[in-house]
Image: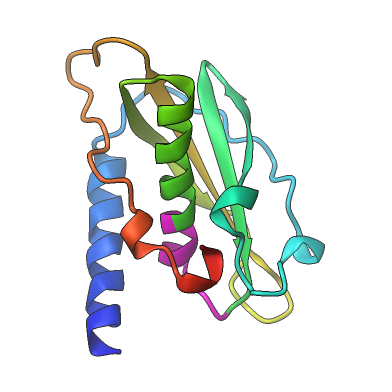
Amino acid sequence: MRLRKIAVVAMAFASVAVLSACSSKSVNVRAPSLGLADVPAGGITKISDVKIKPSGGGNIQFEGVSSSDFTMEDVMAVLYCRAGAYQVEKGFSARQVEALERQSTNNPATPQIVIAVLSFYKDSVPAGVKPMTSDWCDKVPEAAQ
């Protein structure tokens, strides 16, 4: 359990590092299409059930939801893992996080909705862009597999 907490803290710091490396362009985070009724029986969105939609500016928005039994980092891992699969499916060479947002509080009455907006690159990565190098799938909770 202690190792899991250390891993969660490490993921949170990694997320801050990823977000600080994000470009300064304006990112359009659309309203989530998920809500309380979308919390699955297992308590967290499965990788295959992540909502994917265009976010504007060529970005793609990934959405996941969980009950209060899971952390933001758990949902983040699900979203980033799905983004890695999306990258391969669509033939992109790299991806970069543009925005990460939690649109609800994490309490029993309200689901935790997490949205990640990513840019994907077909060919070379523009100068100054630090693409994601991890797929995060090893950090996905078992309930979301």
Residue drawn at (31%, 21%), measured in percent from left and top?
93
Question: 135 or 125, which is in the foreground?
Answer: 135
Eyeballing the image, is 54 above or below 142? above
Give coordinates of residue 126: x percent, y percent: 24, 13
Give coordinates of residue 89: x percent, y percent. 48, 28
Compared with 134, 3 (above or below) is below
Give the residue displayed 76% in from the left and 61% down from the top: 38
Of 37 and 31, the residue lying toward us = 37
Find the magenta span and give its range: 69-77
The quadrant where residue 131 appears: top left
Q: Look at 56% across and 41% down and name the residue there.
A: 62
Q: Nearer the viewer, residue 9 or 40?
A: 40
Magenta residue check for 100: no
- At x 77%, y 65%, the residue is 36
Residue nearest the observer in this picture, 47 or 97: 47
Image quadrant where one finds the N terminus: bottom left
Q: Is residue 112 above or below residue 28?
A: below
Colour basis:
rainbow
| Residue situated furthest top in the rendering | 123
- For this orientation, the residue located farthest to the bottom is 1
Q: Position of residue 79 (x, y in %)?
A: 48, 49
Question: What is the x, y in percent for residue 144?
Answer: 54, 65
Q: Main secondary structure of the magenta part?
A: helix
Relative to 112, is 17 above or below?
above
Disc tally is 0
Q: Residue furthest right?
A: 37
In which quadrant of the rendered view does residue 104 lie? bottom right
